[in-house]
Image: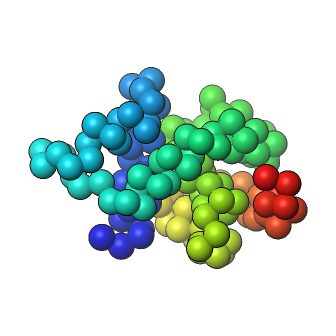
Amino acid sequence: MGRRALRRRAVEILYEAAQRSADPVSLVAERVGRTEVDPVGDYTISLIEGVAAHRERIDELLSEHAQGWTLERMPPVDLAVLRVGVYELLWASDVPDPVAIDEAVGLARELSTDDSPRFVNGVLGRIGTIADRLRAVL
């Protein structure tokens, strides 16, 4: 599986966990190795574990940079996409910033509303402009 598919799978699992009020790490752990569900790749696991480990800081950044939007008002799919995007921007050192943003925008285009790609691009773009400073203090 390519990274885009693995990112998409992470977004789907994060979304499902949010809808079920479940822990995403536990949810993915239940699925690893099971044949009756879609496979879960290593990068998907890494994204979910990373988002879970840094969720408080990720959500703080989203709250600060999603102008006029609270986390509660955001469409749940957009929130899952944004969390993966912020994680990749700040903690996935092997993913260039423009790639993290482009991939998140692409997922928003595939999975959410017509307005979502522009919204995701705006929020991640604002965070991306200060990503170097943020990484220095993480």
What residue is shown at x 36% (from left), y 65% (from top)?
5
Q: Which one is in front, 104 or 137? A: 137
The relative height of residue 73 versus residue 120 in the rendered view (above or below) is above
Q: Position of residue 135 (x, y in %)?
A: 79, 60
Q: Which quadrant is the N terminus positioned in?
A: bottom left
What residue is shown at x 42% (from left), y 61% (from top)?
43
Q: Position of residue 81 (x, y in %)?
A: 53, 51
Looking at the image, residue 12 sits to the left or right of residue 118; the answer is left
Q: Kindly give the residue lying farthest to the left in the view shown.
A: 36
Q: Which one is in front, 115 or 39? A: 39
Q: Which one is in front, 104 or 1? A: 1
Q: Quadrant of residue 9?
A: bottom left
What residue is shown at x 23% (from left), y 55% (from top)?
39
Looking at the image, residue 74 sits to the left or right of residue 33; the answer is right
The relative height of residue 67 versus residue 92 in the rendered view (above or below) is above
Image colouring: rainbow
Q: Position of residue 68 (x, y in %)?
A: 78, 39
The relative height of residue 112 versus residue 92 in the rendered view (above or below) is above
Looking at the image, residue 120 sits to the left or right of residue 23; the answer is right
Q: Quadrant of residue 86?
A: bottom right
Looking at the image, residue 38 sits to the left or right of residue 15; the answer is left
Q: Which one is in front, 26 or 59? A: 26
What residue is shown at x 72% (from left), y 54% (from top)?
123
